[in-house]
Image (spheres, grey):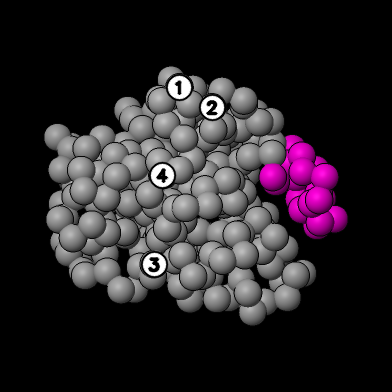
Amino acid sequence: MTPQFFNSAFVPANRRFVQAGARGEKLRLPVRWGLFEHPAAGWVMIDTGYTPAATQSAGRSLGLRAYSAALRPQLLPDGQPDAVLARLGLAAADIAMVIVTHFHADHVSGLRDFPTARFLAVAAAARAVQMRGYLANMRQGVFGELLPPNFEARMMDTAGLATAERAGVRGGDIFGDGSVLAIPLAGHADGHFGLLFADLARPFLYGVDAAWVRAAILQDAAPGYPARLISHDHAAGLDSAQRLRAFAAAGGDLGLCHDPAPMPYDGAAR
């Protein structure tokens, strides 16, 4: 069981913003989402990437319009979930589960396109989205309008997963067979977690948004201000980065959502 990752969009950024001590290099950060087929659970997506719901929908709130205008994502039609699924002979109805690693707009904007899928998420973070006011959510890059109205009814809580340890990492056993673990990675966002694919020849940990580029983790070069202002918990983020650094040092393979460098599991549409 091997994951594939596809790029839904590019977002412009300066390397100085995402890696301490780096030169002022212009970057195009990909916005990945993932897909794999579990032998028992079926087809599973990892987030949804950026979709037109976040960047083009006529019904968007003013806050979401401003958010998109500030970040300026460039959607990639060939990397959109519907296009990728069609190339693979799949449809939205074939997706049994979407793993929601956190609730930022670039990870959840396509959830409404999968009306029959279950969602795996941190329930406490999902409840916080509902309880916080609009402005408080917007300051965290979260827009409740992107979530399906029945999200919580279709959600499974990571807190209910049995704990397992693989490749020196502890997390929630998503399918009960040790193949994929949900790894808490606090710091970037409320309820943020990564995924360990333990049965690959080289264990692969998808760290999602624990950093924008792997060099920031591997070189202990977490960015300072202004990047830390948008971190949910900066100190917790440093701890998560340290654990990922230790995983990589022990021989594990580390991937991130926004790293411009290719990952071994990137699909054709990047």
Residue bearing the label numbered 1: 87
Q: Tell me which residue sits at (82%, 45%) in the image.
A: 58
- The disc at residue 95 is 4
Q: Residue furthest right?
A: 62
Work out whether residue 53 or residue 11 is closer to the camera in this orientation and state it: 53
- The disc at residue 83 is 2
Q: Quadrant of the N terminus?
A: top left
Which sits earlier in the primary sequence, circle 4 or circle 1? 1
Q: Tell me which residue sits at (15%, 43%) in the image.
A: 199
Residue 134 screen position, x and y as percent:
75, 70
Magenta residue span: 53-72
Q: CA distance from mark 4 to mark 1?
A: 14 Å
Residue 8 screen position, x and y as percent:
56, 33
Disc 1 marks which amino acid? Arg
Q: Is residue 79 left or right of residue 39?
A: right
Work out whether residue 224 or residue 43 is closer to the camera in this orientation and state it: 43
Mark 2, Cα crowd under 10 Å, few <14 / some 14-19 / many 20+, is some
Mark 2 and mark 1 in contact (Cβ < 8 Å)? Answer: yes
Disc 4 marks which amino acid? Ile
Mark 4, Cα crowd under 10 Å, few <14 / some 14-19 / many 20+, is many
Residue bearing the label numbered 3: 156
Q: Mark 4 falls on what kind of element?
A: strand
Q: Nearer the viewer, mark 4 or mark 3?
A: 4
Q: Mark 2 falls on what kind of element?
A: helix
Work out whether residue 187 or residue 268 is closer to the camera in this orientation and state it: 268
